[in-house]
Amino acid sequence: MIKRNSVAGLALLSLFAVRAMAATVLTDANLDQFEAMLPKLQQLEQRPQNKQFNLQQHCDWPRHYREISAQEKDSAYQTQIEQLAKEHGFTPVQLVELSAKVTWPVLDSVQPMLEVSRQALMFLPAAQRQKTEKTIQQGQQYYQTLTGCLTADDKTALAKHHDRIMQMAKRLGGVEQILPPGMAAQNKF
């Protein structure tokens, strides 16, 4: 027989799970919050970036956050990002997930350019070719990982908010401004 406390605990856990899921699917409300924090985020980004940004191929967002945090060498920057997320109603994990999802339409739009760049690699000097090839592979891996992590709800929300996300990218100074740290510094699409 199920105890009353167990049922109450399960109900509370399910409410938390639904709330957490709703916070990470793009909505007008969380896009407003995300957009409100972008000017401060841009100010924080005015520093030397890590040269490489790696997103492992899994869909465990808390793990992504831990892995990305481990790649960040500047603990003061990490603290500032976490504080900024909190000020705008996000946990750091939610910020990483929403940032990735907001990045996806931009990455999707540059896929044809990446393919042209890949085909043109043979015309570059060896050192530049290796650097460009590595950047393209990194972008492809990031894009494929994000694509594999999108739920049906995410895809619906991305379709609904596509124009707004692309307008955000334009207002921020172009596609490179909304790409993940490390990729933006190396790519001028």
Image: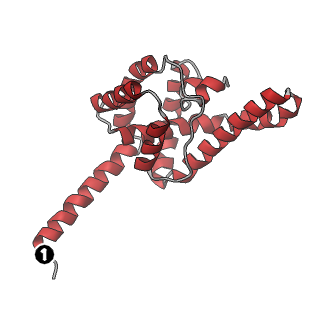
Q: Nearer the viewer, residue 176 or 50?
A: 50
Residue drawn at (49%, 25%), measured in percent from left and top? 168
Please say which color scheme the image uses. Answer: secondary structure
Question: Is 11 left or right of 95, judged from the image as shown?
Answer: left
Q: Which residue is mark 1?
A: 3
Q: Given the current orientation, which residue lies at the most extreme bottom position?
A: 1
Q: Nearer the viewer, residue 84 or 171?
A: 84
Query: x, y (%) of residue 129?
Result: 80, 31
- Residue 161 visible? The answer is no
Query: x, y (%) of residue 38?
Result: 42, 23
Q: Pointer 1: residues within 10 angstroms few (<14), some, or many (20+)?
A: few
Query: x, y (%) of residue 142?
Result: 59, 42
Figure quadrant of residue 181: top right
**Is the N terminus in the top left, top right, bottom left or bottom right quadrant?**
bottom left
- Residue 145 visible? The answer is yes
Residue drawn at (47%, 44%), measured in percent from left and top? 67
Task: Please tell me whether mark 1 sits on a helix, a strand or a loop.
Answer: loop
Q: Nearer the viewer, residue 164 or 124?
A: 124
Kind of residue sitting beneath label 1: Lys
Residue drawn at (44%, 27%), measured in percent from left and top? 74
Query: x, y (%) of residue 50?
Result: 55, 28
Figure quadrant of residue 127: top right
Question: Is 17 left or right of 7, judged from the image as shown?
Answer: right
Rendered position, 160 above or below 33: below
Question: Is 143 left or right of 126, judged from the image as shown?
Answer: left
Rendered position, 78 above or below 173: below
Residue drawn at (54%, 32%), measured in percent from left and top? 180
